[in-house]
Image: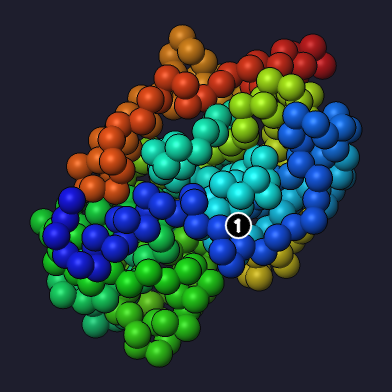
Amino acid sequence: MPTSKNLLLYALALVVIAFVVSGIPRVTLELLSDDHDHDDPIALGTNIWAGYEPLYLARKTGLLADSDARLLEFSSSTQVMRAFANGTIDAATLTLDEVLSLRDAGIVVVVILVLDMSSGGDAIVAHPEFSKIESLRGQRIAVESTALGALMLSRALAKNGLRLTDVEVVSVEIDEQELFLSRGDVDAAVTFSPMLERLKDRGMVEVFSSREIPGEVVDVLVATPHLVEAHSDKLVALAESWFAALDVIDAEPQRAAELMAPRLGVTPSDVLLMFQGLEFPDVAGNLEFLSSESSRIAETARILNQVLVDAGFLDDEVDVESLYSDSIIRVVASQRQGQ
């Protein structure tokens, strides 16, 4: 474990984050637990991120029925993780490293869909006087208390000859980064779209992005094991609505961007720009990721696992073989082939 006081507190926060239940907005909604009616919708927690927006496009266009899933928006992935630990939600959109963090903390989740891979949508931005990662030595960096923040920062520093102890980590929620940077409370921030574009519009410069660590920042849809086993029909409908929304984006990108822009708080042209930094695996791509025969998700998880263990952000290696299931995507693939 790194010896820096700030880093130690930050690392400990990652380990216990799933058990911190105070301050989470409670949602009055029945969940699909063992004793709930089969017709209850999935309670799906998300935070604002361009890569999750096709879910909201599916809802807006009627591709996702309210009877199948209710989308619950939280202000950060930290809150999504806490809500999952609370039992407030029974499915969530998270990065793969955040899933590993939950599993490390004893919260059992199953990856059922690979949503997107970031290729520039996540980045570190800084005030203009810090135009390179190396110039951030000794400076204050705002990082959300999640495994993704830890991963982005540790990889950026390592690739540029720095260590985590060379910077001062300041725990800042994603929706507070703009304020902290404008006040000069921090010198840089680990961020993502649409906050990334907002900060760059305010004069921040990009010093590192997920383009430099291809395949490492992966967004996934996770659910409780009970949901996967007992309510697969709801998850199949949710997954089908996701791919249907991607079809709309491919066929009518401008119209899709206009529908997604208001919720993201950006212009349609900004939405199109954000999507250039994302890769969305199709049904075949998901089969490749999640199939037990090829198991690309397991390979990716092992790499991330080792990075986070080496950096001191996970206690031990997580069992990646039980981390994912291809049962839902196989049904979706079969249904689409039959159309």
Judging by the rendered image, the residue that carries numbered circle 1 is 47
Question: Image height check: is 5 above or below 39?
Answer: below
In this rendering, does residue 75 appear at all?
Answer: yes
Q: Position of residue 232 (x, y in %)?
A: 74, 23
Within 10 angstroms of label 1, few (less than 14), some, or many (20 or more) residues?
A: many
Q: Position of residue 235 (x, y in %)?
A: 73, 30
Q: Secondary structure at mark 1?
A: strand
Q: Residue at x 48, y 13 (%)?
A: 292
Residue 281 sits in which quadrant?
A: top right
Question: What residue type is disc 1 on?
Answer: Asn
Question: Image height check: is 324 above or below 79?
Answer: above
Residue 262 sits in which quadrant?
A: bottom right
In this rendering, does residue 251 appear at all?
Answer: no
In terms of depth relative to the viewer, which is nearer, 162 or 117?
A: 162
Q: Residue at x 66, y 70 (%)?
A: 265
Q: Considering the image in quadrants, where does the C terminus appear?
A: top right
Q: Position of residue 166 (x, y in %)?
A: 14, 66
Q: Position of residue 55 (x, y in %)?
A: 71, 46
Q: Residue at x 51, y 42 (%)?
A: 219
In terms of depth relative to the viewer, which is nearer, 230 or 189?
A: 230
